[in-house]
Amino acid sequence: MPFIEELIKYKSCSIVGLEKNTGKTECFNYVMQRLPLETKRVAVSSIGIDGETTDQVTKTAKPEIFLREGMFFGTSEKHYLMKRLSSELLEISSESTSLGNIVIGKALTPGKILLSGPSSSSGLRRWMDEMKKYDIDLTIIDGALSRMSLASPTVSESMILATGAAYSANINTLVQKTAFVVQMINLDITSQENYDTLNNIKNGVWAIDEEGELHDLKVASSLSININTDGLKKCKTLFVSGALTDNFVNNIRQNRIFNEAELVVRDFTKIFLTPMTYNSFVNGKPKVSVLQKSKLIAVCVNPTSPNGIILDSGKLCNALSEAIKLPVYDLRTQNSEL
């Protein structure tokens, strides 16, 4: 179980699917059943709802969440009452959701549960802080569609990515799209000097010139195309505190002041660039970096899509592994190898 051994080195891990039905919940259950509970105190929760038997969009069957005895968990009051396991109710958290406050419990028997945790990254961080009083060694967060923000290093130290035929029914396209996400996850961290200068900036777009002086470019966000470069002759580092978009990148490419600039974002979840724009911008140079990054532990694939398309698992795993230079797992077919 190579990636389980790697996972337990970290205090937190987010499991993120690139699309619905890419095997995220199956991956979550795989991890749950293999964590060494005799040496690790484990807590789990979800952003959104997970563990439903039927997908509410595609109406296809979904694997249920299964917890082992001794695991701590956070779920809404509504779903706590629906659990199919015996548990100790530890507290009702002040963290609220549309389904009630988050209930913190400890499983006394193995069983199934619907996880509906905090609905935002900030809520997850608050819940994880609350769990420190229970001496938790490892927190696992189950993701939700299009909520890549929970994979931010401000939430979790590590992550597992789930992809598959539901993301693209063509192996080559699937590999290309997934490899680009992995490339963004693995962007280099900027210098310590840049981190110290930029980390506490919460808004706007800022530049560091060749003398190390910080300039506020008076840009509310990267969605704006009006950039104030008064007093800035040449930019060494350009920091975008919010979302990084195609329009912004294409705009700064036209300004010679930014020709040699290192473009820094907080983390990969802030990047909303198409592969074409990104590749054209960097042109083979390491021009985009991050203040923080999570450790990508594993990539798992589901070669089956809800509409019945089944990709060749071996071919998909080999092609994706070659593209991203990491092991890729189809947990249904490779259990014996893991």
Image (spheres, grey):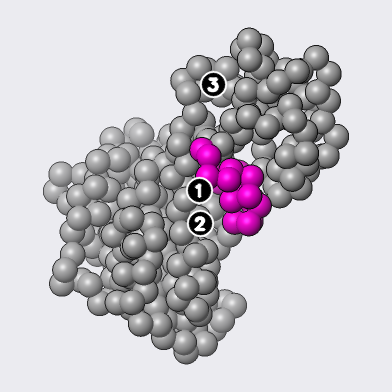
- In the rendered image, the vertical position of residue 212 relative to residue 191, given as above or below: above
| Relative to 202, 334 lies left or right | left
CA–CA distance between discs 2 and 1?
A: 6 Å
Q: Amino acid at mark 2?
A: Phe
Confirm whether the magenta stretch covers residue 273: yes
- Disc 3, disc 1: CB below 8 Å? no
> Residue 166, how many percent across, how many down?
50, 76
Q: Which mark is residue 263?
A: none
CA–CA distance between discs 3 and 1?
A: 19 Å
| Relative to 155, 244 lies left or right | right
> Residue 20, how many percent across, how many down?
52, 70
- In the rendered image, the vertical position of residue 220 relative to residue 276, given as above or below: above
- The magenta segment is 268-286
| Residue that appears at 20% across and 55% down | 2
Confirm whether the magenta stretch covers residue 280: yes
The residue tagged with tag 2: helix, strand or loop? helix
| Residue that appears at 74% across and 45% down | 250
- Disc 2, disc 1: CB below 8 Å? yes
Q: Could you say which is closer to the camera, residue 135 or residue 189?
A: 189
Q: Amino acid at mark 1?
A: Met
Neighbor class of circle 3 (other Cα within 10 Å; few <14, some 14-19, many 20+) is: some
| Relative to 221, 173 lies left or right | left
Q: Which mark is residue 194?
A: 3
> Residue 252, how many percent across, how many down?
74, 37
Name the residue beneath numbered marker 2. Answer: 180
CA–CA distance between discs 2 and 3?
A: 25 Å
| Residue that appears at 16% across and 68% down | 337
Name the residue beneath numbered marker 1. Answer: 184
Of the image marks 3 and 1, the number of the one nearer the N terminus: 1
| Residue that appears at 53% across and 67% down | 19
Q: Amino acid at mark 3?
A: Asn
- Location of residue 146 by image quarter: bottom right
